[in-house]
Amino acid sequence: MEISKFQKEISKIFSEIAKKPDFKEQSKEDILIRIMEEVGEVSRQVIREKYRKDKFNKANLTEEISDVIMLLNFLASKYNIDLSKECEDKIRRMREKFDLGQD
Protein backbone atom coordinates (compact mmCIF):
# COMPACT_ATOMS: atom_id res chain seq x y z
CA MET A 1 0.00 0.00 0.00
CA GLU A 2 1.29 3.46 -0.83
CA ILE A 3 2.12 5.72 2.10
CA SER A 4 -0.47 8.36 1.17
CA LYS A 5 -3.24 5.75 0.88
CA PHE A 6 -2.12 4.14 4.15
CA GLN A 7 -2.10 7.53 5.90
CA LYS A 8 -5.65 8.32 4.71
CA GLU A 9 -6.94 4.88 5.73
CA ILE A 10 -5.43 5.16 9.21
CA SER A 11 -6.97 8.60 9.73
CA LYS A 12 -10.34 7.29 8.57
CA ILE A 13 -10.17 4.30 10.93
CA PHE A 14 -9.23 6.41 13.95
CA SER A 15 -11.99 8.92 13.10
CA GLU A 16 -14.55 6.12 12.92
CA ILE A 17 -13.34 4.69 16.25
CA ALA A 18 -13.69 8.14 17.85
CA LYS A 19 -17.42 8.09 16.98
CA LYS A 20 -18.01 4.89 18.93
CA PRO A 21 -19.51 5.02 22.42
CA ASP A 22 -16.87 5.25 25.16
CA PHE A 23 -14.28 6.67 22.72
CA LYS A 24 -13.30 10.22 21.88
CA GLU A 25 -11.27 12.10 19.31
CA GLN A 26 -7.61 11.84 20.20
CA SER A 27 -5.59 14.99 20.61
CA LYS A 28 -2.07 15.27 19.25
CA GLU A 29 -0.81 14.84 22.80
CA ASP A 30 -2.91 11.70 23.28
CA ILE A 31 -1.43 10.24 20.11
CA LEU A 32 2.10 11.10 21.21
CA ILE A 33 1.57 9.36 24.55
CA ARG A 34 0.32 6.25 22.75
CA ILE A 35 3.34 6.34 20.41
CA MET A 36 5.67 6.43 23.41
CA GLU A 37 3.83 3.50 25.01
CA GLU A 38 4.13 1.46 21.81
CA VAL A 39 7.82 2.34 21.37
CA GLY A 40 8.29 1.03 24.92
CA GLU A 41 6.70 -2.26 23.85
CA VAL A 42 9.02 -2.45 20.83
CA SER A 43 11.98 -1.75 23.11
CA ARG A 44 10.91 -4.49 25.49
CA GLN A 45 10.90 -7.10 22.73
CA VAL A 46 14.24 -5.95 21.27
CA ILE A 47 15.85 -6.16 24.72
CA ARG A 48 14.26 -9.56 25.32
CA GLU A 49 15.70 -10.89 22.09
CA LYS A 50 19.19 -10.12 23.36
CA TYR A 51 18.91 -10.75 27.10
CA ARG A 52 15.75 -12.82 27.70
CA LYS A 53 15.42 -15.02 24.63
CA ASP A 54 12.82 -17.17 26.38
CA LYS A 55 10.55 -14.10 26.67
CA PHE A 56 11.11 -12.77 23.13
CA ASN A 57 7.97 -12.80 20.99
CA LYS A 58 8.46 -11.87 17.33
CA ALA A 59 4.72 -11.79 16.66
CA ASN A 60 4.32 -9.21 19.43
CA LEU A 61 7.29 -7.22 18.10
CA THR A 62 5.69 -7.17 14.65
CA GLU A 63 2.38 -5.96 16.08
CA GLU A 64 4.01 -3.24 18.20
CA ILE A 65 6.08 -1.92 15.27
CA SER A 66 2.86 -1.79 13.22
CA ASP A 67 1.17 0.16 16.02
CA VAL A 68 4.02 2.70 16.06
CA ILE A 69 3.84 3.14 12.29
CA MET A 70 0.06 3.59 12.36
CA LEU A 71 0.18 6.11 15.18
CA LEU A 72 3.01 8.11 13.58
CA ASN A 73 0.97 8.26 10.38
CA PHE A 74 -2.06 9.42 12.34
CA LEU A 75 -0.04 12.13 14.11
CA ALA A 76 1.36 13.31 10.78
CA SER A 77 -2.21 13.58 9.47
CA LYS A 78 -3.18 15.73 12.45
CA TYR A 79 -0.45 18.15 11.33
CA ASN A 80 -1.46 17.86 7.63
CA ILE A 81 1.93 16.35 6.78
CA ASP A 82 2.06 14.43 3.51
CA LEU A 83 4.31 11.57 4.58
CA SER A 84 4.60 10.21 1.05
CA LYS A 85 6.14 13.46 -0.18
CA GLU A 86 8.22 13.99 2.95
CA CYS A 87 9.66 10.46 2.87
CA GLU A 88 10.55 10.80 -0.81
CA ASP A 89 12.27 14.12 -0.07
CA LYS A 90 14.12 12.59 2.88
CA ILE A 91 15.36 9.65 0.79
CA ARG A 92 16.62 12.08 -1.86
CA ARG A 93 18.44 14.17 0.77
CA MET A 94 20.01 11.07 2.35
CA ARG A 95 21.21 9.84 -1.05
CA GLU A 96 22.78 13.25 -1.68
CA LYS A 97 24.28 13.54 1.80
CA PHE A 98 25.95 10.13 1.64
CA ASP A 99 26.77 10.35 -2.09
CA LEU A 100 24.72 7.27 -2.94
CA GLY A 101 23.46 8.39 -6.33
CA GLN A 102 19.95 7.81 -7.61
CA ASP A 103 18.24 4.46 -7.29
Image: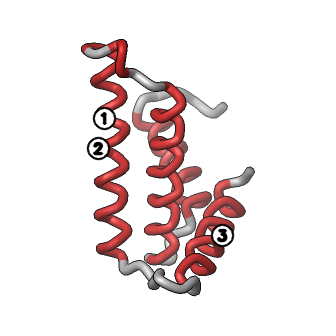
The residue depicted at 57 percent of the width and 86 percent of the height is 19
Query: Amino acid under label 3?
Result: Lys
Q: Is residue 25 left or right of residue 5?
A: left
**Mark 2: few/some/many CA within 10 Å (<14, 14-19, 20+):** some
Q: CA distance from mark 3 to mark 2?
A: 26 Å
Distance from the alpha carbon under mark 1 to that under mark 3: 27 Å
Question: Which residue type does callout 2 highlight?
Answer: Gly
Instruction: Please report contact status of discs 2 and 1: CB closer than 8 Å, yes or no.
Output: yes
> Pointers 1 and 3 in contact (CB under 8 A)?
no
Residue to which mark 2 is pinned:
40
**Where 14 falls versus 3 (above or below)?**
below
SS for callout 2 = helix
Horizontal side of residue 65 vs 49, given as left or right: right
> Where is residue 37 drawn, in percent x and y?
31, 53
Number of other residues with Cα within 10 Å of mark 1, as a class: few under 14, some 14 to 19, many 20 or more: some
Query: Which residue sits at x=66%, y=31%?
Result: 103
Disc 1 residue type? Ser
> Along the polypeptide, which appears first: circle 1 or circle 3?
3
Q: Which residue is mark 3?
A: 8
Looking at the image, residue 76 lies above or below residue 26: above
Residue pictured at 46% horizontal, 43% vertical? 64
Q: Nearer the viewer, mark 3 or mark 2?
A: 2
Q: How is the image coloured?
A: secondary structure
Q: Callout 3: helix, strand or loop?
A: helix
Residue wearing tag 1: 43
Tell me residue 41's x, y (percent): 34, 41
> Extreme front residue here?
22
Counting other residues with Cα less than 10 Å from the Cα at mark 3, is it few (<14), some (14-19), or many (20 or more)?
Answer: some
- Which of the labelled discs sits on residue 52, or is there none? none
